[in-house]
Image (tube, rainbow, N blue to C red):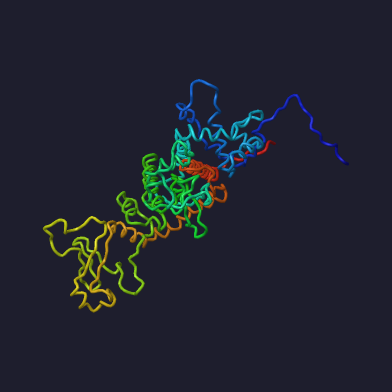
């Protein structure tokens, strides 16, 4: 039998609970148990006036942002629409059916003002990390670090070649916010001071972004998000935004390790990274802090002509010399100089040479220095630390570490494919930092929700 036609009928009273209509296995139910915003009002209290109209609850704004980043809703305008329509989103944001949703412009006003002034997003991220530590997901023994390129909100059509870019012509009073931030970070090791080399192109809308072709394809403007993770459960313990160049990315690891040590008293026994982090100064920095570098060494001492390499020579630290396979010594200096200006220099690289007469008469000259009169070997300032890394690379723990390093790459894949952060929406160093902090917070919350899902409730009999 054909049923009656359904027609909407108004009612005088409704008994409706949003909580009853949110599935118990919904992601936001699991995440909600780990979102602690109890101290957010105290954190922001000095940034609000004691008079005037009541402001929008900052906890509501943060909860809406978490919904957007946890579920891959990139547009704040669309986020407001989704929160207005979706019951689960309303429940997570503590909104009733009759409560209005803030306008999307409210996010920009708060982000550029009190949120950044109070470093609220960094506080939110660190609160989540502290929760992961409290729940036993972070041991602090093994850390892994890596960086990933995120496309900036800029394009080549609105850029200037390096030979035409003149910083002195920029008027800060007339410049957009991203340009003013660019001027503010010119001396920052993560941005302007990371390298003396000027980029090939500079964006007018976001000058701090780096023109790069690191993906072996068409070049683009980008920032780098740098992760420091604990390999036990792939929890992100720190995140840093930098220019997309190796010097800035490597330097960010030192910054993050120091910050994690100060904030959470986490001091790892080893750090895992790829070859980009295997420079002498970086390895020396780690060894000086008793952190074992499970990192491939950047070594250009190899030869492809079949002759002996530096690895074939034995280092004699006690006598400051190398011993060749034939038992002859290669020394840096063979006499004591009365004039200190003629003695050792502090260039960071020492050169060790064999005696010409000895090398000419050596039966293995063809294997050692066939095209020169004597053999010479250079030794860098941090060669001892480089050797520590080479020795570690021969251990079984190193092979395990190289497998654990993939956990960082998996987080970057999740960041781009699931959370949708393949291109930034905000401009400038502060905008990139805001997005990276929120995305890392969302990933940690999703990790907590996955490991500790919300308990399932059985139906009533």
Q: Is there any visible trace of residue 300 in the rendered image?
A: yes
Q: Is there any visible trace of residue 228 in the rendered image?
A: no
Q: Nearer the viewer, residue 84 or 31?
A: 84
Q: Position of residue 305 (x, y in %)?
A: 35, 74
- In the image: residue 257, left or right of residue 20: left
Using the image, determine if residue 318 lies above or below residue 43: below
Circle count: 0
Q: Quadrant of residue 366?
A: bottom left
| Residue furthest top as drawn | 51
Image quadrant containing the C terminus:
top right
Q: Position of residue 332 (x, y in %)?
A: 20, 63
Q: Nearer the viewer, residue 208 or 119?
A: 208
| Residue furthest right as drawn | 1
Q: Which residue is drawn at the image coordinates 53% and 31% (left, top)?
A: 58
Q: Position of residue 2 (x, y in %)?
A: 87, 41
- In the image: residue 324, left or right of residue 260: left
| Residue furthest left as drawn | 338
Q: Quadrant of residue 330?
A: bottom left
Q: Nearer the viewer, residue 389 or 200?
A: 200
Q: Nearer the viewer, residue 410 or 186?
A: 186
- In the image: residue 87, left or right of residue 392: right
Q: Position of residue 348 (x, y in %)?
A: 26, 56
Q: Which residue is drawn at the image coordinates 37% and 42% (left, top)?
A: 261
Image quadrant containing the N terminus:
top right
């Amino acid at each position: 039998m054909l049923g009656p036609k359904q027609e909407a009928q108004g009612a005088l009273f409704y008994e409706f609970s949003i909580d009853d209509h949110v599935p118990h296995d919904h992601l936001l139910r699991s995440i909600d148990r780990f979102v602690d915003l109890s101290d957010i009002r105290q954190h922001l209290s000095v940034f609000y006036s004691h008079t005037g109209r009541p402001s929008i609850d900052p906890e509501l704004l943060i909860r809406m942002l978490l919904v957007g980043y946890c579920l891959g809703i990139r547009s704040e305008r669309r986020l407001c629409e989704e929160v207005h329509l979706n019951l689960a989103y309303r429940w997570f944001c503590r909104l009733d059916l009759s409560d209005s949703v803030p306008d999307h412009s409210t996010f920009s006003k708060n982000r550029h003002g009190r949120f950044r002034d109070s470093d609220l997003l960094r506080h939110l991220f660190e609160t989540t990390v502290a929760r992961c530590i409290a729940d036993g997901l972070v041991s602090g023994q093994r850390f892994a670090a890596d960086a990933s390129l995120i496309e900036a909100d800029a394009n080549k059509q609105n850029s200037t070649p390096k030979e035409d870019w003149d910083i002195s012509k920029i008027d800060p009073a007339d410049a957009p916010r991203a340009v003013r931030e660019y001027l503010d970070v010119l001396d920052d090791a993560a941005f302007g001071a990371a390298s003396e080399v000027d980029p090939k192109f500079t964006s007018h809308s976001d000058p701090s972004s780096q023109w790069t072709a690191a993906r072996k394809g068409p070049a683009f403007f980008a920032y780098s998000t740098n992760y420091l993770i604990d390999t036990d459960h792939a929890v992100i313990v720190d995140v840093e935004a930098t220019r997309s160049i190796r010097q800035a990315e490597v330097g960010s690891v030192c910054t993050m390790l120091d910050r994690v040590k100060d904030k959470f008293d986490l001091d790892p026994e080893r750090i895992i990274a790829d070859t980009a982090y295997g420079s002498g100064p970086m390895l020396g920095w780690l060894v000086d802090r008793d952190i074992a570098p499970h990192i491939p060494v950047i070594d250009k001492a190899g030869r492809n002509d079949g002759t002996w390499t530096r690895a074939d020579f034995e280092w004699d630290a006690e006598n400051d010399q190398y011993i060749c396979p034939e038992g002859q010594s290669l020394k840096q200096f063979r006499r004591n100089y009365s004039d200190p200006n003629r003695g050792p220099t502090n260039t960071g690289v020492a050169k060790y040479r064999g005696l010409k007469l000895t090398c000419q008469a050596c039966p293995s000259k063809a294997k050692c220095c066939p095209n020169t009169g004597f053999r010479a070997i250079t030794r860098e300032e941090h060669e001892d630390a480089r050797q520590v890394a080479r020795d570690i690379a021969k251990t079984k723990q190193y092979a395990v570490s190289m497998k654990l390093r993939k956990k960082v790459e998996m987080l970057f894949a999740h960041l781009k494919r699931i959370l949708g952060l393949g291109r930034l929406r905000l401009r400038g160093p502060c905008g990139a930092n805001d997005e990276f902090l929120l995305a890392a917070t969302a990933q940690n919350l999703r990790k907590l929700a996955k490991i500790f899902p919300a308990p399932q409730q059985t139906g009533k009999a």
